[in-house]
Amino acid sequence: MNAFQQYFFDLAQEYPRWNFIFFYDPVQTQRVIDGLIMTVQLSVICVILSVIIGILGAWLQGAPSKIVRMIVQGYIQFFRNTPPLVQLLFFYFALGQFTPTYSPDGWLEVPIISNVGWAIISLSFFAGAFNVEIFRAGVEAVPESTQEAAEALCMNRSQVFRYVVFPLAFRVSLPALNNNLVNLVKTTTQALAIAVPELLYQMISIYNDYSTAQYACMLVLFIAYIVLVGILVMGMNHWERRIKVPGYGH
């Protein structure tokens, strides 16, 4: 045991209610690391997918087809008007029973979409619904004259959106997008409900096994999310400053 581990071991002996067991027990340390890695992976994948969904949805909202616009609007209303935890349970338990399975050993039937997969799908669609509206607001902030000028250069609808409208709309949308992505990272904790082994799941498992570690687990969990969200916010704020167009959107 090194000095760092010895300190927390002695602390647990002196103050049993503050048992930071994951700082001196290698097995519990690995559980925390695995949980943190899963949380980061879940957050990164959901952030990327939700932004893609938001961009695609904002583009489809301007489609000539009324049916397409109604489908997008229905998607938005469904995911905005129901709690994310209910959505997660619906995807996993209701839709999950229709998921095809495979048998790796000839006996056990394993669904092709795991609980982690359903968490990614559910959370991405949830945040994506808000991102659609965020990007739509950004698109509407682009002056009509700018779009008309692009069309006068013989650009089609896709080219106007890709090269003219969206780059400007994205800059306007960044502050609201920042808030939504922060909420998404915090919402990943709800994956606990379908046994995704993210950080909250692992911390609860640890203090279920070692009741004296409850306070320590919650303290470290709290700090971990402050750091994760802080990194995201600083990154988004830096990005916003880098791509800011002077005098535009303010």
Image: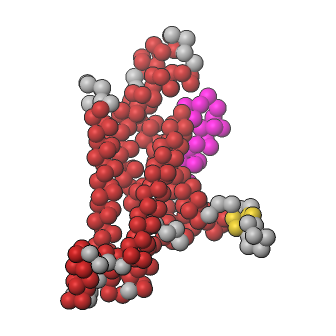
Whole-percent x, y for residue 229 in the image: 33, 55
Whole-percent x, y for residue 147 in the image: 46, 19
Quarter of the image for the N terminus: give it: bottom left
Q: Quadrant of residue 146?
A: top left
Q: Is residue 196 magenta?
A: no
143, 94: nearer the viewer: 94
Q: Quadrant of residue 11?
A: bottom left
Please indicate whether residue 11 sits to the left or right of residue 53 in the image.
left
Q: Is residue 127 visible?
A: no
25, 77: nearer the viewer: 25
Residue located 55% across and 37% down the image: 56
Seen in the picture, residue 157 relative to 111 is either above or below; the reply is: above
Indicate how the structure is coloured in the image.
secondary structure
Residue located 59% across and 65% down the image: 115
Residue located 31% across and 36% down the image: 240
Whole-percent x, y for residue 213 in the image: 33, 82
Q: Which residues are magenta?
A: 60-79
Seen in the picture, residue 112 relative to 236 is either above or below; the reply is: below
Residue located 35% across and 34% down the image: 172
